Image: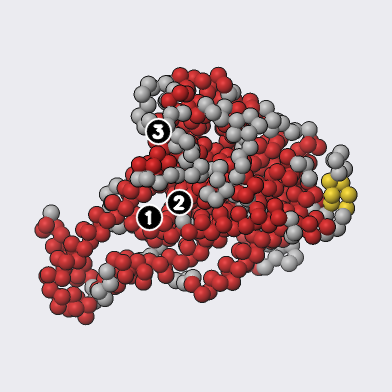
Amino acid sequence: MADQRTIETTASARRLPKARRQQSRSNGTRGEEAAQDKRQGSLTAAYITLSIGGAVVVVPFVWELLTSLKTFNESMKTPPTYIPRTWDFPNYMEVFSQAPFLNMLAVSIGYALLLIIGHVGLGSLAAYAFACLKFPGRDVIFFTLIALLMIPRQLFILPQYEIVQWLGWTNSFWGLVAPHFVGVLAVFLLRQFFLSLPVELTEAAKLDGAGPLRIYFFVLLPLAKPGLIAATILVLIYSWNDLLWPLVILNDDAKMPLTAGLATLQGEFFTDQPVVMAGAVLASLPMILAFLFLQRHFIDGIAFSGGK
Amino acid sequence: MTMAPVRSTGRRSGGRRPKQGAWGSRSRAESIAGLLLVLPVTLLLGLFQLWPLIRGAYLSMTETGYFGGSEFIGLDNFARLFVDPEVLGAFRNSVVYTLVVLAGVPISAVIASLMNNPSLRLRPFFRALFFLPVVTIPAAAGLAWGTLLNGNYGPLNHVLGLVGIDGPYWLQDPNYALLAVAVVGIWSTLGYNMILFMAGLKGIPREMYEAAELDGAGRLRQFFSVTIPLLSPTTFFVSVTSVITSMQMFDLMYIMIGADQGVGLRNPAIEDTQTVVYLFYTYAFKENDRGYASALAVVLLLAVLALTFIQFRFQRRWVHYG
């Protein structure tokens, strides 16, 4: 181990320009050791800081979980107990009987799926056209859409409500989906992605006589996978967390996605904290599981939204 | 989809640059394909965003009657907005919330740079830990924090009590409620910003640090002289998006302060704590004052645009593009 480290240091020293190498040699071995110690020290500091930070971040989850397993009486105790005296697992059954939990889960999943189809499916077709095809009005349409990206969504909500009302879709799943079925952000990000792909590929396919759609499906789509997955993750997080619109357009608990459902559950069972917390745990679980299994993609998706 | 065979002779339609040789003969087909591909998205966005923008601007100049009818009143709503203490208070609250969330941005930068330590073994574990709040439904997060901060039987006040501090009713006391929500705001965006900063850090070449080290700069000095300036484009991006999203914050406010606390019980702190979008929600869907609500949304739009513009204006002072 120690040998290897020496080899590494000499190897890295060899890579340095001569003048610098001499300078570092003049510092002598003692300086090198001190640097090593310092690095070790900063690593320890990093572990300590990250552990404390991580613990702070995780406290609400732990408390939520512990509370969800207490009896109603225990949850109201002062001072609070930390580990439940009696583990009250039936709180979780209570969630299913007090609220149409499975309906809400189904609405959340359906909402997410349809938004992914719209934002990523239809969105990538448009993004491809904006990036790779020439057609009249292309730039005008594109920049009009981009301008919409700057508008806070609240300004849209009342007129969107009017449209959904006019369609007769208030308090329905389609009313929930329709205004958010497609989005500008996915189109914009995917367009950037298509622009980053080498032009030679499409040029070659053009010379081979492939039409626009064939190029999209057989040449670009396989290459665009990272961009498509990233956009899917972003839409998934957005649709899963959205609260304002579901709250506005839906009245029946059974038609609400989990976000709005939880808010309503809280209003009705405010004092019964264990049941509310059990609902919160159950509602958070699907997305957290998805994240744990698809971590890489989630991280890439976020980095992608930052243009990386 | 079947494709027409390529025509060998280049009968280009007018106005195309000769560079576009291969498809030149089919520029019409390309135009049609392009238009068809953008059509669904354009139509839907036109209906559900562009039209609402126009309609919203119009609604902001109307007064909503008791029976749903509306009457054009010009700019009266705006004149009323600028002297309405409730509206001014909501803007103050949103700005305070935004400033507190911005104050959390350096925390995520520090976490990201600690994670960037090449010898750190548990990086994926820590990354997942800090990212967890991002994939937690804000409603669930708000509820969990609500019990944590509960004035009577919450563990925070219990722990504070052990060291002799009498903790307030965090979410019911107007002096603390907004701050408490903003802390949750920091908590829920920390992981998101951390990922952006980590991606930014990846773009800083190692040689920069090696050079700094050879010049005798310690870790701390390296952080201030290399990391911070080279990370400034990411910091700029994060602060611009943080301001935009924080100014529009609704969900945590609704869950933690706004929603009924038991049937028909209102939180006494809501009037002093509500943000602009929460107030918008109240005007539009509780009080059914749609014209006034639309005017509020227009002012929010202008405020967000102004804040973004100011940030772009001042970026030259501190943002270094490689």
The amino acid pointed to by label 1 is: Ile
Q: Give the quarter of the figure containing the N terminus of chain A.
A: bottom left
Q: Name the residue located 88 percent from the left edge and 53 percent from the top edge.
A: B72
Whichever of labels 2 and 1 marks the residue nearer the N terminus, that label is 1
Please give the chain letter of the residue carrying mark 3.
A
The residue beneath circle 1 is B111
Label 1 to label 3, Cα distance in Å? 34 Å
Q: Position of residue A40 (x, y in %)?
A: 21, 58
Total count of labels: 3
Q: Name the residue located 33 percent from the left edge and 51 percent from the top edge.
A: A50
As helix, strand or loop, the secondary structure at mark 1 comes to helix
Labels 2 and 3 touching (C-beta < 8 A)? no
The residue beneath circle 3 is A79
Q: Is residue B199 left or right of residue A49?
A: right
Judge by depth and name the residue closer to the eye, A65 or A80. Answer: A80
Mark closer to the observer (1, 3) = 3
Residue A154 seen in this snapshot? yes
As helix, strand or loop, the secondary structure at mark 3 comes to loop
Q: Name the residue located 54 percent from the left edge and 59 percent from the top edge.
A: B99
Labels 2 and 1 touching (C-beta < 8 A)? yes
| Location of residue B74 (image quadrant) | bottom right
Q: Position of residue A281 (x, y in %)?
A: 47, 31
Categorize mark 3 by other alpha carbons within 10 Å: few (<14), some (14-19), many (20+): some
The amino acid pointed to by label 3 is: Pro
Categorize mark 2 by other alpha carbons within 10 Å: few (<14), some (14-19), many (20+): many
Please give the chain letter of the residue carrying mark 1.
B
Q: Position of residue A25 (x, y in %)?
A: 15, 75
**Which numbered tag is attached to residue B190?**
2
Label 2 to label 3, Cα distance in Å? 31 Å
| Location of residue B24 (image quadrant) | bottom right
Categorize mark 1 by other alpha carbons within 10 Å: few (<14), some (14-19), many (20+): many
